[in-house]
């Protein structure tokens, strides 16, 4: 067979050929060098401009939410007690430990007060650093004490400015993730703009500042950005090691700052497991991520004095089971399509079984019951049987733990975010399915063929796809978790709109693909979208920044001032979890219960304390309260006569059902519920009947609160 190859030599004179050839080569090399230098300069310029824009948008978001907080409360003008009351429910509890550390005589005494705390739960000494994720408050308080800023900045401002500053980190991380995925910082700009314009659904930091998720989610976003970079191909060993270190640090900080970290990372581990099974991610990197998750969580466990809830988490059991299963089952990625599918099904069953066995074994050894209320809630929520469990019902009846409201999608659609998200999600999902099937079916082919099979979906894009799908399912089922999804939705939608791969796929499907057309569309559509967002929402943002309101809660202020002025420092107070968190923060008095619900003993105690809103005799209520050394009990009309929830979900209804009593009002009751022998305590006590005044004396009241002092019988 005749072939044509490049000619090595010729019979023509060298003088005739060499000179033009040399000139041509010199020109060609000069052109390549010039192109390379120009490309390098362009990359440096792009990185510089993109980095400046990222920092600017991060700082802008931080200033924006800080301004909204100031405008909403007039925080700089209100009294200290009003500032503290503005930290509602569990937010006030967490901030109280920061205040406690600041006011301690020394750092050592402050830490001792947290490790041996006897004011958060009466007649019980607990370790706050073990039970709660408050290391951030400890770190900030120490930082405030050692820095020379006391005369320039009040402790409360140092605290809230730190949280608002973390919003800058959050937005920059989202920006960088989108930039890494698409290859252009324009998508990062679009992601940040979407995050800001959809603020109602992407963050609640301006009105729940100390909430754990506001500390944790910025670090989670940094972790996702680092994982996205890790899954890029052709990383140098040094780059890979540094990226793994960044993932570990971000994972550790995320785990340290939020008690629900284990559930979020379990979903993340499930995403990695699915993609690894279908050969879409490099197995070695996935294994490192499993190890990093376990290592970060165990390090947090050690810092939290070996908190048993962490050791008994499903994440530790799941990741350990995967690593064990991989050593047992080998050659998972060899064989025909049906053969591999069978192996994967067996692998999934093995991992699931091992996870349940390991988790049950750990919980049995540690006698762990701290998280049982979560599983009871999930069981009832997803229809695996009705429940009368008081703790599970408390969650089920809260709107935050219900399904995601449909009006969320209308708000997200106003900014075009939801439309673009679906537009990108559909073709990416179809691509992922096709790639997964092709990977399984071409497993025995040559390496070049395998690369050809997987080239249509990059590992970093695949990870972010499964991440957004799984966290989307979580958000749809539980509204409170929507902030994990909506922020990543901004990243995923902006990436798709600026991605060459996505537009190439879409244009090929409609037979309109050309390289030039793809390049024009990937820049033109995002710019038009940005202009639309600015045109539609900029005036509203400016109006929002000009809207001035003021904190106003005179009844709670009056209550806190009365407690500080008229009760001893050692007095023990009982009442609702939400109110008592404020009592601890504003007055420093001892509590019977509080909103940090991840402890079985506390849950049982809270149910007992809440009998003040049930149909119980004054003697029973008095006996229960005195068993916790209660001196004062605070009754709230908003709970006793609640109308916020429907019948069956009011706190008094939940107590009646748990006690086996018929609920108040018109409506059906379960056939086994019976009428109570006693009237409702919180209503009857106000009549000052002898049977009540023998045990309780009213010492304070206003339009909202009634405080009763308990008699001390011998």
Image: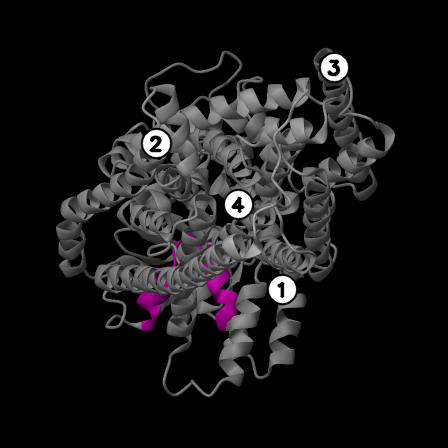
Percent x, y of residue 291:
73, 47
Q: Residues within 10 Å of mark 4 (few under 14, many from 20)?
A: many
In terms of sequence position, does the residue under pointer 3 or pointer 4 come before the other? 3
Quadrant in the rendering for residue 275:
top right
Contact check, label 4 and label 1, Cβ < 8 Å? no
Where, quadrant-wise, is the C terminus in this rendering?
bottom right
The residue carrying mark 2 is: 645
Q: SS of the residue at dot 1? A: loop
Q: Residue at x 21, y 45 (%)?
A: 533
Magenta span includes 263: no
Note whether 378 is above or below 215 in the view shown: above
Q: SS of the residue at dot 4? A: helix
The residue carrying mark 4 is: 609
Q: Residues within 10 Å of mark 1 (few under 14, many from 20)?
A: some
In terms of sequence position, does the residue under pointer 3 or pointer 2 come before the other? 3
The residue carrying mark 3 is: 336
Percent x, y of residue 599:
63, 46
Magenta span includes 86: yes
Question: What whole-number distance in Å separates the C-alpha atoms at marks 3 and 2?
Answer: 57 Å
Question: What whole-number distance in Å separates the C-alpha atoms at marks 3 and 4?
Answer: 63 Å
């Amino acid at each position: 067979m005749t072939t044509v190859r490049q000619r090595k030599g010729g019979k023509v004179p060298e003088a005739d050929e060499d000179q033009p050839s040399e000139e041509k080569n010199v020109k060609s090399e000069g052109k390549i060098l010039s192109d390379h230098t120009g490309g390098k300069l362009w990359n440096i310029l792009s990185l510089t401009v993109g980095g400046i824009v990222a920092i600017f948008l991060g700082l802008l978001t931080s200033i924006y939410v800080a301004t909204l907080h100031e405008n909403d409360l007039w925080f700089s003008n209100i009294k200290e007690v009003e500032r503290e009351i503005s930290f509602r429910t569990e937010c006030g509890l967490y901030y109280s430990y920061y205040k406690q550390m600041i006011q301690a005589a020394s750092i050592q005494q402050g830490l001792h007060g947290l490790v041996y705390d006897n004011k958060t739960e009466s007649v019980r000494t607990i370790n706050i650093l073990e039970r709660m994720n408050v290391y951030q408050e400890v770190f900030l308080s120490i930082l405030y004490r050692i820095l020379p800023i006391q005369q320039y900045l009040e402790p409360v401002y140092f605290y809230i400015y730190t949280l608002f500053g973390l919003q800058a980190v959050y937005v920059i991380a989202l920006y960088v993730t989108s930039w890494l995925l698409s290859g252009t910082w324009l998508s990062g700009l679009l992601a940040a703009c979407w995050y800001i314009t959809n603020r109602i659904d992407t963050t609640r930091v301006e009105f729940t500042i100390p909430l754990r998720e506001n500390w944790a989610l910025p670090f989670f976003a940094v972790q996702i950005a680092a994982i996205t970079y890790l899954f890029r191909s052709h990383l140098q060993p040094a780059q890979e090691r540094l990226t793994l270190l960044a993932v570990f640090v971000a994972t550790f900080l995320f785990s340290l700052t939020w008690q629900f970290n284990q559930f979020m990372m379990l979903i993340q581990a499930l995403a990695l497991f699915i993609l690894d099974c279908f050969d879409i991610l490099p197995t070695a990197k996935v294994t490192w991520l499993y190890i990093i998750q376990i290592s970060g969580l165990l390090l947090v466990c050690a810092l939290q004095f070996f908190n048993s809830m962490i050791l008994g988490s499903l994440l530790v059991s799941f990741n350990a089971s995967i690593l064990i299963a991989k050593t047992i089952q080998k050659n998972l990625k060899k064989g025909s399509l049906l053969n591999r599918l069978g192996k994967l099904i067996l692998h999934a069953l093995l991992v699931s079984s091992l996870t349940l066995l390991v988790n049950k074994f750990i919980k049995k050894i540690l006698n762990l019951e701290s998280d049982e209320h979560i599983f009871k809630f999930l069981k009832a929520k997803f229809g695996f049987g009705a429940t009368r469990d008081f703790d599970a019902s408390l969650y089920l009846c809260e709107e935050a733990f219900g399904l995601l409201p449909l009006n969320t999608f209308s708000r997200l659609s106003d900014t075009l975010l939801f439309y673009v998200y679906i537009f990108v999600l559909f073709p990416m999902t179809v691509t992922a399915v096709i790639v997964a099937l092709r990977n399984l079916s071409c497993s025995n082919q040559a390496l070049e063929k395998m690369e050809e099979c997987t080239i249509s979906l990059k590992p970093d894009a695949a990870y972010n796809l499964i991440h957004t799908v799984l966290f989307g399912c979580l958000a749809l089922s539980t509204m409170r978790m929507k902030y994990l999804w909506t922020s990543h939705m901004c990243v995923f939608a902006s990436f798709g709109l600026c991605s060459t791969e996505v537009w190439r796929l879409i244009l090929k499907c409609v037979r309109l693909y050309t390289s030039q057309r793809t390049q024009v569309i990937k820049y033109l559509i995002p710019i038009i979208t940005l202009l639309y967002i600015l045109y539609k929402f900029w005036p509203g943002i400016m109006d929002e920044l000009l809207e001035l309101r003021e904190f106003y809660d005179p009844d709670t202020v009056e209550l806190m001032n009365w407690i500080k002025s008229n009760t001893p420092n050692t007095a023990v107070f009982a009442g609702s979890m939400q109110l008592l968190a404020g009592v601890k923060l504003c007055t420093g008095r001892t509590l019977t219960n509080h909103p940090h619900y991840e402890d079985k003993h506390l849950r049982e105690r809270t149910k007992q304390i809440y009998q003040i809103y049930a149909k119980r005799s004054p003697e029973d209520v008095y006996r229960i309260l005195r068993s916790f050394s209660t001196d004062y009990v605070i009754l709230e009309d908003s709970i006793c006569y609640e109308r916020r929830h429907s019948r069956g979900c009011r706190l008094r209804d939940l107590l009646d059902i748990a006690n086996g009593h018929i609920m108040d009002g018109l409506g059906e009751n379960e056939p086994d519920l019976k009428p109570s022998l006693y009237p409702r305590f919180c209503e009857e006590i106000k009549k000052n009947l002898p049977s009540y005044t023998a045990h309780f004396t009213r010492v304070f009241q206003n339009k909202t609160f009634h405080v009763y002092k308990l008699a001390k019988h011998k």
